[in-house]
Amino acid sequence: MRRVFDVTCAAAGLVLLSPLFALIALAIKLNGGEGSIFYLQPRVGKNGREFYLMKFRSMVSGADRHGMLTLTDDMRVTPVGRFLRKYKLDELPQLINVLKCDMRLVGPRPEMKRYVDMFPSEYQALLQDLPGITDPASLAYRYEEKMLKTECPEEYYVSHILPHKLRLSLEYSQSRTFFSDLKIIFQTLAAAKTGEERGSSSYSASQPPGNPISNKK
């Protein structure tokens, strides 16, 4: 039932949002300079299989050469990209990932292999199922770039933010139901509509715990 629901919603969303897709694509080309409309990045999916996560490009071309994490006021983000990221419109192409069976609507966010390798046992448990577009960790860390204003952003991400996200995802995976997934979807839509940091979500992460999960290399 969940798979039918995911595919139906993704297909309907792509059809209904096709005019918005066209407007976003035009804005990216007019404002973003050279480069593709879409940004594709390898992520680890179910059972460790890698796939390409799709987003609307929100940064200048070649931004990956200067680091994979996005910080507050990151100069690589284009003006259009800043708007897309605020309302999470850059994530819309992941509906295509749902249709391709790479992802589902609700599930742990897929990560890059380098981070998955740091937490093998946690991801082995989480990736028995498809990763998703949103989940409690995604809601709690809607604007995680604001927490990365440190001298060593990646070190802080690996030692504090990612472990807490994994804990939230693991806890949710143990008690999730179809109706709890619906609640997460509605909370995500509400947060995206307002563009606010927490929207109507009950999940927050203003101060992530010190290190709830020890990373294993």
Image (tube, rainbow, N blue to C red):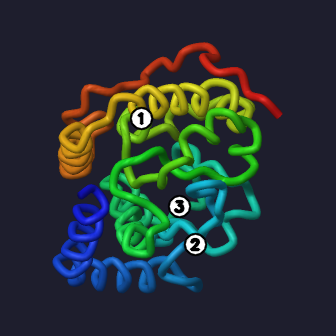
x 50%, y 35%: residue: 146
| 137, 207: nearer the viewer | 137
Q: Secondary structure at mark 2?
A: strand
Q: Secondary structure at mark 3?
A: loop
The residue under label 3 is 77
The residue under label 1 is 173
Residue 191 at least partly seen: no
* CA neighbours of label 3 inside 10 A, class few (<14), some (14 to 19), many (20+): many
* CA neighbours of label 2 inside 10 A, class few (<14), some (14 to 19), many (20+): some
Q: Earlier in the sequence, mark 2 or mark 3?
A: 2
Q: Nearer the viewer, mark 2 or mark 3?
A: 2
Marks 1/2 in contact by CB < 8 Å: the verdict is no
Image coords of residue 74 (percent x, y): 57, 51
The residue under label 2 is 40
x 37%, y 35%: residue: 136
Can you say which quadrant of the picture contains the N terminus? bottom left
**C-alpha gap between disc 1 and disc 3:** 33 Å
Image coords of residue 85 (percent x, y): 40, 56
Q: Earlier in the sequence, mark 1 or mark 3?
A: 3
